[in-house]
Protein backbone atom coordinates (compact mmCIF):
# COMPACT_ATOMS: atom_id res chain seq x y z
CA UNK A 1 0.00 0.00 0.00
CA UNK A 2 1.29 3.47 -0.87
CA UNK A 3 2.45 5.41 2.21
CA UNK A 4 0.08 8.23 3.19
CA UNK A 5 0.46 11.15 5.61
CA UNK A 6 -2.74 11.61 7.58
CA UNK A 7 -3.22 14.40 10.13
CA UNK A 8 -5.30 13.83 13.26
CA UNK A 9 -7.59 16.67 12.16
CA UNK A 10 -7.89 19.37 9.54
CA UNK A 11 -10.04 22.52 9.82
CA UNK A 12 -12.80 22.64 7.20
CA UNK A 13 -12.43 26.04 5.53
CA UNK A 14 -12.61 27.47 2.02
CA UNK A 15 -13.01 30.61 -0.06
CA UNK A 16 -15.96 31.76 2.07
CA UNK A 17 -13.67 32.11 5.11
CA UNK A 18 -11.04 33.91 3.02
CA UNK A 19 -13.62 36.34 1.63
CA UNK A 20 -15.31 36.94 4.98
CA UNK A 21 -12.04 37.81 6.73
CA UNK A 22 -10.85 39.91 3.77
CA UNK A 23 -14.07 41.95 4.04
CA UNK A 24 -13.37 42.59 7.72
CA UNK A 25 -9.82 43.74 6.92
CA UNK A 26 -11.17 46.09 4.26
CA UNK A 27 -13.83 47.43 6.64
CA UNK A 28 -11.21 48.63 9.12
CA UNK A 29 -13.27 47.30 12.08
CA UNK A 30 -10.93 44.57 13.24
CA UNK A 31 -11.85 43.79 16.81
CA UNK A 32 -15.15 43.14 18.56
CA UNK A 33 -17.84 44.43 16.21
CA UNK A 34 -20.84 43.50 14.08
CA UNK A 35 -19.50 40.15 12.84
CA UNK A 36 -18.97 39.02 16.45
CA UNK A 37 -22.59 39.93 17.23
CA UNK A 38 -23.72 38.00 14.16
CA UNK A 39 -21.71 34.95 15.26
CA UNK A 40 -23.15 35.20 18.80
CA UNK A 41 -26.69 35.36 17.42
CA UNK A 42 -26.11 32.34 15.19
CA UNK A 43 -24.79 30.24 18.09
CA UNK A 44 -27.60 31.35 20.43
CA UNK A 45 -30.28 30.51 17.90
CA UNK A 46 -28.64 27.19 16.92
CA UNK A 47 -28.39 25.91 20.48
CA UNK A 48 -31.65 27.52 21.57
CA UNK A 49 -30.22 29.76 24.30
CA UNK A 50 -31.15 33.32 25.25
CA UNK A 51 -27.62 34.77 25.38
CA UNK A 52 -24.32 33.85 23.74
CA UNK A 53 -21.25 35.92 24.55
CA UNK A 54 -18.11 35.52 22.45
CA UNK A 55 -14.72 35.46 24.17
CA UNK A 56 -11.11 34.66 23.37
CA UNK A 57 -11.35 30.95 24.31
CA UNK A 58 -13.31 28.32 26.17
CA UNK A 59 -10.84 28.76 29.02
CA UNK A 60 -11.68 32.45 29.44
CA UNK A 61 -15.41 31.69 29.07
CA UNK A 62 -15.20 29.10 31.85
CA UNK A 63 -13.25 31.48 34.07
CA UNK A 64 -15.85 34.23 33.54
CA UNK A 65 -18.64 31.73 34.23
CA UNK A 66 -17.15 30.65 37.57
CA UNK A 67 -16.45 34.26 38.56
CA UNK A 68 -20.00 35.28 37.69
CA UNK A 69 -21.37 32.37 39.73
CA UNK A 70 -19.43 33.85 42.68
CA UNK A 71 -17.19 30.81 43.08
CA UNK A 72 -14.53 32.01 45.49
CA UNK A 73 -11.68 30.68 47.70
CA UNK A 74 -12.93 27.98 50.05
CA UNK A 75 -15.42 26.64 47.51
CA UNK A 76 -15.06 23.20 45.94
CA UNK A 77 -15.79 22.50 42.28
CA UNK A 78 -16.16 18.91 41.06
CA UNK A 79 -14.80 17.87 37.67
CA UNK A 80 -13.54 14.74 35.96
CA UNK A 81 -9.76 14.41 36.09
CA UNK A 82 -9.97 13.06 32.56
CA UNK A 83 -10.20 16.43 30.81
CA UNK A 84 -8.02 19.10 29.30
CA UNK A 85 -5.99 20.93 31.96
CA UNK A 86 -7.96 24.16 31.38
CA UNK A 87 -11.01 22.71 33.16
CA UNK A 88 -8.99 22.41 36.37
CA UNK A 89 -7.00 25.62 35.86
CA UNK A 90 -10.09 27.85 35.69
CA UNK A 91 -11.15 26.59 39.12
CA UNK A 92 -7.76 27.60 40.47
CA UNK A 93 -7.97 30.96 38.68
CA UNK A 94 -10.96 31.91 40.86
CA UNK A 95 -9.16 30.57 43.94
CA UNK A 96 -11.42 27.55 44.45
CA UNK A 97 -10.49 23.91 45.01
CA UNK A 98 -10.77 21.38 42.16
CA UNK A 99 -12.17 18.01 43.29
CA UNK A 100 -11.32 15.30 40.76
CA UNK A 101 -13.67 12.36 40.22
CA UNK A 102 -13.64 9.31 37.97
CA UNK A 103 -15.23 8.78 34.57
CA UNK A 104 -17.33 5.95 33.14
CA UNK A 105 -15.28 4.02 30.62
CA UNK A 106 -18.16 3.54 28.20
CA UNK A 107 -18.56 7.31 27.75
CA UNK A 108 -15.25 8.83 29.00
CA UNK A 109 -17.47 11.33 30.84
CA UNK A 110 -17.92 12.09 34.54
CA UNK A 111 -19.41 9.17 36.46
CA UNK A 112 -22.65 10.29 38.16
CA UNK A 113 -22.00 7.76 40.95
CA UNK A 114 -18.50 9.15 41.58
CA UNK A 115 -19.89 12.68 41.46
CA UNK A 116 -22.50 11.85 44.09
CA UNK A 117 -19.82 10.54 46.44
CA UNK A 118 -17.69 13.67 46.09
CA UNK A 119 -20.27 16.26 47.19
CA UNK A 120 -19.50 18.06 50.45
CA UNK A 121 -20.88 21.13 52.20
CA UNK A 122 -18.31 23.18 50.30
CA UNK A 123 -19.34 22.01 46.80
CA UNK A 124 -20.56 25.02 44.86
CA UNK A 125 -20.30 23.90 41.25
CA UNK A 126 -19.87 20.93 38.94
CA UNK A 127 -18.03 21.14 35.64
CA UNK A 128 -19.19 18.20 33.52
CA UNK A 129 -17.11 17.84 30.37
CA UNK A 130 -18.60 16.59 27.09
CA UNK A 131 -15.49 14.62 26.26
CA UNK A 132 -14.65 14.19 22.57
CA UNK A 133 -18.04 15.79 21.80
CA UNK A 134 -20.12 13.11 23.52
CA UNK A 135 -22.58 14.79 25.91
CA UNK A 136 -22.29 13.81 29.57
CA UNK A 137 -25.48 12.46 31.17
CA UNK A 138 -26.86 15.85 32.13
CA UNK A 139 -30.14 14.64 33.64
CA UNK A 140 -28.30 12.28 35.99
CA UNK A 141 -25.93 15.11 36.94
CA UNK A 142 -28.80 17.59 37.52
CA UNK A 143 -30.64 15.11 39.69
CA UNK A 144 -27.61 14.96 41.98
CA UNK A 145 -26.76 18.68 41.85
CA UNK A 146 -30.20 20.31 42.13
CA UNK A 147 -31.16 19.19 45.69
CA UNK A 148 -27.87 20.70 46.95
CA UNK A 149 -28.29 23.96 45.00
CA UNK A 150 -25.07 23.23 43.12
CA UNK A 151 -24.48 25.13 39.86
CA UNK A 152 -23.71 23.20 36.69
CA UNK A 153 -21.30 24.83 34.25
CA UNK A 154 -20.94 22.65 31.15
CA UNK A 155 -17.46 22.43 29.67
CA UNK A 156 -18.65 22.02 26.09
CA UNK A 157 -15.27 22.94 24.59
CA UNK A 158 -15.58 19.97 22.21
CA UNK A 159 -19.35 19.83 21.87
CA UNK A 160 -20.76 22.48 19.53
CA UNK A 161 -23.32 20.63 17.42
CA UNK A 162 -23.75 17.71 19.85
CA UNK A 163 -27.18 16.97 21.31
CA UNK A 164 -28.46 15.53 24.57
CA UNK A 165 -31.89 13.88 24.31
CA UNK A 166 -32.35 15.63 20.95
CA UNK A 167 -31.63 19.09 22.35
CA UNK A 168 -28.46 20.88 21.30
CA UNK A 169 -25.77 21.15 23.98
CA UNK A 170 -25.93 24.75 25.19
CA UNK A 171 -29.73 24.79 25.09
CA UNK A 172 -30.39 22.80 28.22
CA UNK A 173 -30.56 25.71 30.63
CA UNK A 174 -27.09 25.44 32.18
CA UNK A 175 -24.25 27.89 31.69
CA UNK A 176 -22.28 26.34 28.83
CA UNK A 177 -18.88 27.19 27.37
CA UNK A 178 -17.68 26.31 23.86
CA UNK A 179 -14.26 26.39 22.20
CA UNK A 180 -13.48 27.30 18.60
CA UNK A 181 -9.84 26.19 18.64
CA UNK A 182 -8.84 24.52 15.32
CA UNK A 183 -9.01 21.09 17.00
CA UNK A 184 -12.78 21.58 17.37
CA UNK A 185 -15.45 20.85 14.74
CA UNK A 186 -15.77 24.51 13.76
CA UNK A 187 -13.05 27.05 14.35
CA UNK A 188 -12.24 30.74 14.58
CA UNK A 189 -8.51 30.10 15.12
CA UNK A 190 -8.85 30.69 18.84
CA UNK A 191 -12.15 31.68 20.42
CA UNK A 192 -14.86 30.73 22.85
CA UNK A 193 -18.50 31.36 23.71
CA UNK A 194 -20.34 31.55 27.00
CA UNK A 195 -24.03 30.67 26.74
CA UNK A 196 -26.57 31.43 29.45
CA UNK A 197 -30.27 31.97 30.10
CA UNK A 198 -29.51 34.58 32.76
CA UNK A 199 -29.75 38.13 31.43
CA UNK A 200 -27.84 39.66 34.34
CA UNK A 201 -25.04 37.16 33.91
CA UNK A 202 -24.87 37.92 30.18
CA UNK A 203 -24.67 41.66 30.88
CA UNK A 204 -21.97 41.20 33.52
CA UNK A 205 -19.98 38.88 31.25
CA UNK A 206 -19.95 41.50 28.49
CA UNK A 207 -18.64 44.10 30.95
CA UNK A 208 -16.03 41.80 32.51
CA UNK A 209 -14.60 40.67 29.17
CA UNK A 210 -14.13 44.30 28.10
CA UNK A 211 -11.92 45.67 30.92
CA UNK A 212 -14.96 46.27 33.13
CA UNK A 213 -16.23 49.03 30.82
CA UNK A 214 -19.86 49.99 31.33
CA UNK A 215 -20.22 50.90 27.62
CA UNK A 216 -19.58 48.33 24.89
CA UNK A 217 -17.34 48.97 21.88
CA UNK A 218 -20.36 48.81 19.59
CA UNK A 219 -22.29 51.35 21.69
CA UNK A 220 -19.22 53.62 21.68
CA UNK A 221 -18.95 53.27 17.92
CA UNK A 222 -22.57 54.33 17.51
CA UNK A 223 -22.36 57.21 20.02
CA UNK A 224 -23.05 60.56 18.41
CA UNK A 225 -23.03 62.86 21.43
CA UNK A 226 -20.22 63.88 23.75
CA UNK A 227 -22.37 62.85 26.73
CA UNK A 228 -22.72 59.32 25.33
CA UNK A 229 -18.96 59.10 24.79
CA UNK A 230 -18.23 60.36 28.32
CA UNK A 231 -20.73 57.92 29.87
CA UNK A 232 -18.16 55.14 30.06
CA UNK A 233 -17.30 54.03 33.60
CA UNK A 234 -15.14 51.26 35.07
CA UNK A 235 -16.73 49.87 38.22
CA UNK A 236 -14.77 46.63 38.51
CA UNK A 237 -11.51 44.99 37.47
CA UNK A 238 -12.12 43.38 34.09
CA UNK A 239 -10.16 41.54 31.40
CA UNK A 240 -9.51 41.81 27.72
CA UNK A 241 -11.30 38.69 26.55
CA UNK A 242 -12.80 40.29 23.43
CA UNK A 243 -13.20 38.24 20.29
CA UNK A 244 -11.94 39.97 17.15
CA UNK A 245 -14.22 40.87 14.26
CA UNK A 246 -11.99 38.67 12.06
CA UNK A 247 -12.81 35.69 14.27
CA UNK A 248 -16.49 36.68 14.30
CA UNK A 249 -16.54 36.62 10.49
CA UNK A 250 -14.90 33.19 10.48
CA UNK A 251 -17.41 31.96 13.04
CA UNK A 252 -20.40 33.09 10.97
CA UNK A 253 -19.19 31.15 7.94
CA UNK A 254 -18.24 28.13 10.03
CA UNK A 255 -21.70 28.04 11.65
CA UNK A 256 -23.20 27.90 8.14
CA UNK A 257 -21.05 24.82 7.52
CA UNK A 258 -21.89 23.09 10.81
CA UNK A 259 -24.70 20.83 9.51
CA UNK A 260 -22.51 19.56 6.68
CA UNK A 261 -19.53 19.03 9.00
CA UNK A 262 -21.65 17.07 11.50
CA UNK A 263 -23.07 14.81 8.78
CA UNK A 264 -19.62 14.17 7.30
CA UNK A 265 -18.04 13.41 10.67
CA UNK A 266 -20.92 11.08 11.58
CA UNK A 267 -20.63 9.17 8.30
CA UNK A 268 -16.88 8.68 8.80
CA UNK A 269 -17.30 7.68 12.44
CA UNK A 270 -19.84 5.02 11.41
CA UNK A 271 -17.47 3.66 8.77
CA UNK A 272 -14.70 3.41 11.40
CA UNK A 273 -16.96 1.78 14.00
CA UNK A 274 -18.24 -0.85 11.56
CA UNK A 275 -14.66 -1.75 10.62
CA UNK A 276 -13.28 -1.70 14.17
CA UNK A 277 -16.08 -3.92 15.47
CA UNK A 278 -14.38 -6.67 13.45
CA UNK A 279 -10.93 -6.13 15.01
CA UNK A 280 -10.37 -8.36 18.05
CA UNK A 281 -8.28 -5.96 20.14
CA UNK A 282 -9.95 -2.63 19.38
CA UNK A 283 -12.90 -1.28 21.38
CA UNK A 284 -14.81 1.30 19.29
CA UNK A 285 -16.54 4.20 21.11
CA UNK A 286 -20.09 3.66 22.40
CA UNK A 287 -22.93 6.13 21.99
CA UNK A 288 -25.52 6.05 24.77
CA UNK A 289 -29.16 6.45 23.68
CA UNK A 290 -29.37 9.97 25.14
CA UNK A 291 -26.44 11.31 23.12
CA UNK A 292 -25.87 12.50 19.58
CA UNK A 293 -22.15 13.26 19.44
CA UNK A 294 -20.51 15.66 17.00
CA UNK A 295 -17.52 13.26 16.74
CA UNK A 296 -15.06 16.03 17.60
CA UNK A 297 -12.63 13.18 18.27
CA UNK A 298 -12.85 9.51 17.40
CA UNK A 299 -11.24 7.56 20.23
CA UNK A 300 -10.86 3.78 20.50
CA UNK A 301 -9.45 1.72 23.34
CA UNK A 302 -6.87 -0.99 22.87
CA UNK A 303 -7.97 -3.93 25.00
CA UNK A 304 -5.84 -5.74 27.58
CA UNK A 305 -5.67 -8.91 25.49
CA UNK A 306 -3.95 -7.12 22.62
CA UNK A 307 -0.51 -8.71 22.06
CA UNK A 308 1.12 -5.26 22.10
CA UNK A 309 0.41 -2.28 24.34
CA UNK A 310 -1.29 0.98 23.32
CA UNK A 311 1.99 2.90 23.03
CA UNK A 312 3.38 0.33 20.61
CA UNK A 313 0.17 0.56 18.58
CA UNK A 314 0.45 4.37 18.51
CA UNK A 315 4.12 4.22 17.49
CA UNK A 316 3.31 1.79 14.69
CA UNK A 317 0.65 4.18 13.36
CA UNK A 318 3.08 7.11 13.55
CA UNK A 319 5.66 5.02 11.67
CA UNK A 320 3.30 4.69 8.71
CA UNK A 321 2.37 8.40 8.62
CA UNK A 322 -0.81 8.38 10.72
CA UNK A 323 -1.06 11.15 13.31
CA UNK A 324 -2.77 9.79 16.42
CA UNK A 325 -3.00 10.86 20.04
CA UNK A 326 -2.41 8.32 22.78
CA UNK A 327 -4.08 8.81 26.17
CA UNK A 328 -5.48 12.38 26.01
CA UNK A 329 -4.85 13.53 29.58
CA UNK A 330 -5.75 13.37 33.26
CA UNK A 331 -5.25 16.46 35.39
CA UNK A 332 -4.50 14.68 38.67
CA UNK A 333 -1.28 13.14 37.34
CA UNK A 334 0.11 16.49 36.21
CA UNK A 335 2.75 18.03 38.51
CA UNK A 336 0.52 20.98 39.44
CA UNK A 337 -2.31 18.73 40.68
CA UNK A 338 -0.39 15.62 41.74
CA UNK A 339 -1.15 14.25 45.19
CA UNK A 340 -4.67 15.67 45.44
CA UNK A 341 -6.27 12.29 44.78
CA UNK A 342 -4.75 8.84 44.46
CA UNK A 343 -4.75 6.90 41.20
CA UNK A 344 -6.59 4.04 42.90
CA UNK A 345 -9.58 6.33 43.47
CA UNK A 346 -9.80 6.98 39.74
CA UNK A 347 -9.40 3.51 38.19
CA UNK A 348 -11.30 4.25 34.99
CA UNK A 349 -9.33 7.44 34.43
CA UNK A 350 -6.09 5.46 34.78
CA UNK A 351 -7.44 2.78 32.45
CA UNK A 352 -8.33 5.41 29.84
CA UNK A 353 -4.84 6.92 30.15
CA UNK A 354 -3.30 3.53 29.38
CA UNK A 355 -5.64 2.29 26.67
CA UNK A 356 -7.13 5.20 24.72
CA UNK A 357 -6.07 6.19 21.24
CA UNK A 358 -7.47 9.09 19.20
CA UNK A 359 -7.52 8.44 15.45
CA UNK A 360 -7.67 10.90 12.55
CA UNK A 361 -11.14 12.18 11.64
CA UNK A 362 -12.12 15.24 9.62
CA UNK A 363 -14.84 16.02 7.08
CA UNK A 364 -12.48 16.02 4.09
CA UNK A 365 -11.10 12.58 4.97
CA UNK A 366 -11.32 10.28 1.94
CA UNK A 367 -12.43 6.66 1.99
CA UNK A 368 -8.90 5.73 0.87
CA UNK A 369 -7.47 7.54 3.90
CA UNK A 370 -9.92 5.81 6.24
CA UNK A 371 -9.13 2.40 4.71
CA UNK A 372 -5.45 3.14 5.22
CA UNK A 373 -6.05 3.90 8.92
CA UNK A 374 -8.25 0.81 9.38
CA UNK A 375 -5.66 -1.48 7.76
CA UNK A 376 -2.83 0.15 9.73
CA UNK A 377 -4.68 -0.28 13.03
CA UNK A 378 -5.43 -3.90 12.21
CA UNK A 379 -1.71 -4.49 11.47
CA UNK A 380 -0.58 -2.46 14.50
CA UNK A 381 -2.68 -4.52 16.92
CA UNK A 382 -1.26 -7.83 15.67
CA UNK A 383 1.85 -9.49 17.11
C1 LIG B 1 -12.48 19.75 27.64
C2 LIG B 1 -11.81 21.05 27.32
N1 LIG B 1 -12.00 22.11 28.12
C3 LIG B 1 -11.43 23.30 27.85
C4 LIG B 1 -10.61 23.49 26.75
C5 LIG B 1 -9.99 24.81 26.51
O1 LIG B 1 -10.45 25.40 25.30
P1 LIG B 1 -9.70 26.65 24.70
O2 LIG B 1 -8.48 26.13 24.01
O3 LIG B 1 -10.67 27.26 23.74
O4 LIG B 1 -9.37 27.55 25.82
C6 LIG B 1 -10.37 22.41 25.90
C7 LIG B 1 -9.51 22.57 24.74
O5 LIG B 1 -9.10 21.65 24.08
C8 LIG B 1 -10.99 21.16 26.18
O6 LIG B 1 -10.80 20.09 25.40
Image: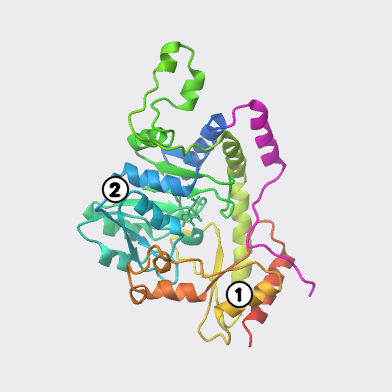
Q: Position of residue 32 (x, y in %)?
A: 53, 32
Give the CA separation, mark 1 to mark 2: 40 Å
What residue would you read off at disc 1?
314
| Residue 374 can be seen in this image | no
Mark 2 crowdedness (10 Å alpha carbons): few <14, some 14-19, many ≥20? many
Q: Secondary structure at mark 1?
A: helix
Residue at the image point whose x is 63% and y is 56% from the top: 264
Residue at the image point whose x is 42% and y is 53% from the top: 155
Mark with earlier residue (1, 2) = 2
Q: Position of residue 171 (x, y in %)?
A: 42, 46
Q: Which mark is residue 71?
A: 2
On the image, which quarter does residue 274 sit in?
bottom right
Q: Residue furthest left?
A: 121
Q: Residue furthest right?
A: 2
- Residue 100 vertical placement versus 236 (above, below): below
Q: Position of residue 150 (x, y in %)?
A: 26, 52
Per the rendered image, the range of residues in magenta is 1-30
On the image, which quarter does residue 123 sit in?
bottom left
Please identify the quadrant where the N terminus is shown.
bottom right
Residue at the image point whose x is 57% and y is 53% from the top: 185
Q: Secondary structure at mark 2?
A: loop
Say left or right for 74 vs 375: left
Mark 1 crowdedness (10 Å alpha carbons): few <14, some 14-19, many ≥20? many
Amino acid sequence: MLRMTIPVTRPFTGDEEKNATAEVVESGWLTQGPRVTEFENKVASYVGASHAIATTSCTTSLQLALELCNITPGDEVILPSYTWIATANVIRMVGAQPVFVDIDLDTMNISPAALKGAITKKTRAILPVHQFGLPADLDAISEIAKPHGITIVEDAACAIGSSYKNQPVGGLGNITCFSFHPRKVITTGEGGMLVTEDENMARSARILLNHGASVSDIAKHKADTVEALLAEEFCEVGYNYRMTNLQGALGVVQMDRLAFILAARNEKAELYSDAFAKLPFVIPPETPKYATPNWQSYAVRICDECPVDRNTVAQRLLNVGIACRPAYMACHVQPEYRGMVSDTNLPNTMKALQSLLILPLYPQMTEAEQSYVIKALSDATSE
